[in-house]
Amino acid sequence: MGFIKNIDEISHTDLHRDVLEIIEKGLEAADPEKVFPERLRLEGEKLYIMGREHRLAGRVYIIGIGKASGKMMNAIERILGDRIYRGAIIVPKGYRVERKLNKIEILEGEHPIPGKATQRSSERIMEIIEEIGEGDTAVILISGGASALFEIPAEDLGIEDIAEITQELLRSGATIEEINTVRKHLSRTKGGRLGKTLKRRKAHVITLIMSDVVGDPIDIIASGPTAPDPTTYCQAKEILRRRIGRKTSEKIERVIEKGCRGELEETPKPGDLELEGISNIVIISNTDSLREMRRESKARKYNTIILSNTIEGEAREAGKILASIAKAMLRIGEPTKPPAVILAAGETTVRVKGKGVGGRNQELALSAGIKLKNEREAIVASIGSDGIDGNSIAAGGIGDHTLQSEADALGIDLIEYLENNDSYTALSRLKRTIVTGYTGINIGDLILIASRRRE
Amino acid sequence: MGFIKNIDEISHTDLHRDVLEIIEKGLEAADPEKVFPERLRLEGEKLYIMGREHRLAGRVYIIGIGKASGKMMNAIERILGDRIYRGAIIVPKGYRVERKLNKIEILEGEHPIPGKATQRSSERIMEIIEEIGEGDTAVILISGGASALFEIPAEDLGIEDIAEITQELLRSGATIEEINTVRKHLSRTKGGRLGKTLKRRKAHVITLIMSDVVGDPIDIIASGPTAPDPTTYCQAKEILRRRIGRKTSEKIERVIEKGCRGELEETPKPGDLELEGISNIVIISNTDSLREMRRESKARKYNTIILSNTIEGEAREAGKILASIAKAMLRIGEPTKPPAVILAAGETTVRVKGKGVGGRNQELALSAGIKLKNEREAIVASIGSDGIDGNSIAAGGIGDHTLQSEADALGIDLIEYLENNDSYTALSRLKRTIVTGYTGINIGDLILIASRRRE
């Protein structure tokens, strides 16, 4: 049983089916239950991670946070088995975790906006950490989503203050780097602060990271709970000024202001000894998926190019540019001749203005589809690897050369839907939403441009 | 003497110099004075255009409109010589046309917003056309900019009505397709109406086109004065509703409304016999430049890819995506390994919100440069082939991996300049504007992504 639930329904052509099956392979390639056994090996007290030796001393605690922590937990359990002493993971509310170990508690938090469950679960994690003693080992499993799922606010802030500023920042079009710079300075867990707590307890710390952030920066993924933080209170202040301005709450402004004046302890910085000895290892990232999708595309006889693993920008504009690459394939045989698949990964953003249902992947696909009108056979597909795109139930969408004509026939004004951020509604009416449900993985978005000239 | 005037000043590295010299070759490859002799050949009464025979009967009139009409005129004159009977061209005010033939008048118009000079010059062209008789030949030289330079308003509209709606549409972020759909239905010259006038006079008509529109659509370039027009009054109405809404002037709304009700004559449609026998030939386009730049890049030992000849979308978002391709080259050696040059062409757009000085090419470069911060050696350069980017005196700009650090050192807040559409001011302070002055050619924008890993 694959990730994509509706392949048959949305395979309008053979090219669609190929694209969807290639995406399926891309998702599989980022599955910890497949990847961990290839990259981790236990030998007595030693854990080899991608060939490098790490010590597994004392009692072994597993702490997992993020959308992929269920699958990461299952995968590490199969490798470490009885070596695990105890642990806990936090997954988003509603995520079904397939298997439940007795030793590892499964907790829930709110996502993408943190709430009471997040705080309660985070406090439970801190209780477990209180137990960890000198010489014990903490294996931290980090994946995207952890910023919202793992949070204990700093100073006198409540979780509702964090929720509010997160929401404002998401709405403002702020980048993930910017959002996390702010969050790290309002938190007792983020920006290396969890790592600092663990090192104070003299534990060994191994952090395994599934990256959902372009470029795999360990300080930004999940707001880097065990990574040194190069950002500062003063930078957070500047971001708030630029992105939110006067709408910033007084309480938050007060904390940031105080920190920027040097009256609060900064997050641990790169080179600081406080985090010495912590291994932050990106164990799975979008390049795993890209390489597997390339292999699969070539096996299916497509000319294949990996365009980028760091795509960012406004989703609808990215869609236009990716469509322009599809057009170039069809019209001038560049950057390669059809039949071809061009692969990309990253994470686009949406500056929400409308009230519709959709997400960045479906907006990208919809916008690309509009631009592919009157072309020969071409597809731009985009999918959020976690399975949930924006406020919709779909993971992503498909834009293709017949989208516009089919919409016209049904009287669906695609541009109006796009303007209203209602990409899901438009694409689902045209059977072009990709549905997976929660995948349990999270490596950002996967994007495919495919072309086949009709013979 | 090349097109780019400040190569020495802006060649911060060897990579910069290579990029600029490759762009220089790209501009040369679109110069009619170089291309026409290769593609046009006169043999008695026959003119061979890219190998195909066309008749040059009767008196030969030359009518040129657009930013490249000076160079197109010089080029055609060198081929047809004494066969030319008379003619006129319209260039933008301030364009210096190198050589002045006695037989061909050089007129001026306003650009990008038409004004009194445009109308006066257009009426002079129509006077000359009044002379053309049965069996004579009209060679029409079309290039971008002609939509503003050649205009006689329809119905009771004045040139100031056209000016106003053009300005509103440009500000609204409307695409060139949308703008021209509206303009064609407010005009006595556009949307095939010039062609219709010429065919009524029983002239032979050969239109040579330098394309500045992505995909080279002959009905959109210069608003297609001799091309069939697939668009309608009712579509123009819909575009006005969507893009301008209530700000549309009553006078314009009345004309479009009347047309949409069928009370005005539509523009000639594809398949209509009215334009039968007119040859609309795209003689120069951005693919000429792309192919020459590829040749030059390969000669300089760069891995080379042509990404697309139809790039469109919001300039600053395109900049981010192109930067993400540069990053992928540096980080994972995809889509190709450095040293590499990736070539693209098209035309981005800017939704102007600020009051600064700049243009789409400089915004694209500035936005890309911001994203290249902390990367190894990489450049994204973008240039408007006509030599004037937006409301600045530069043709384009360079974004590179040291842009941000140099800006920081000078206390220049790049994001603030970008937000204020002030890309020229920022880039010129950092010696990263490409200056050409009017080039006399117009094939849209050329974009280069270049990377070289330091050894």
Image: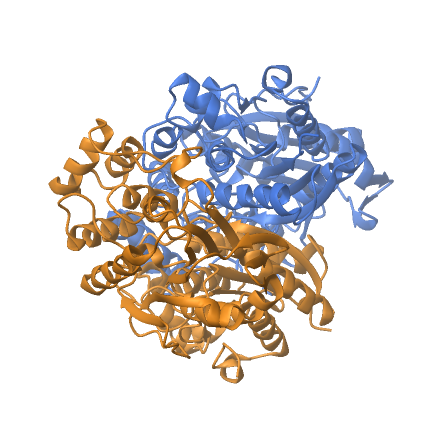
Chain colours: A orange, B blue
Q: Is residue A48 left or right of residue A217?
A: right
Quadrant location of the C terminus of chain B in the rendered image: top right
B39 vs B429, nearest the viewer: B429
The furthest residue to the top: B9
Q: Residue at x 31, y 56 (%)?
A: A129
Res. A415 visible in picture? yes
B146 vs A322, nearest the viewer: A322
B230 vs A209, nearest the viewer: A209
Res. A29 visible in picture? no
Q: Residue at x 33, y 59 (%)?
A: A419
A216 vs B164, nearest the viewer: A216
Q: Is residue B324 left or right of residue B352?
A: right
Quadrant location of the N terminus of chain B in the rendered image: top right
State the image quarter where residue B242 is shown. Answer: bottom left
From the top left corner, tell me how far across and down residue A128 is, in percent: 29, 61
Say if B401 sits above or below A152 in the image.
above
From the top left corner, tell me how far across and down residue A62 is, in percent: 40, 63
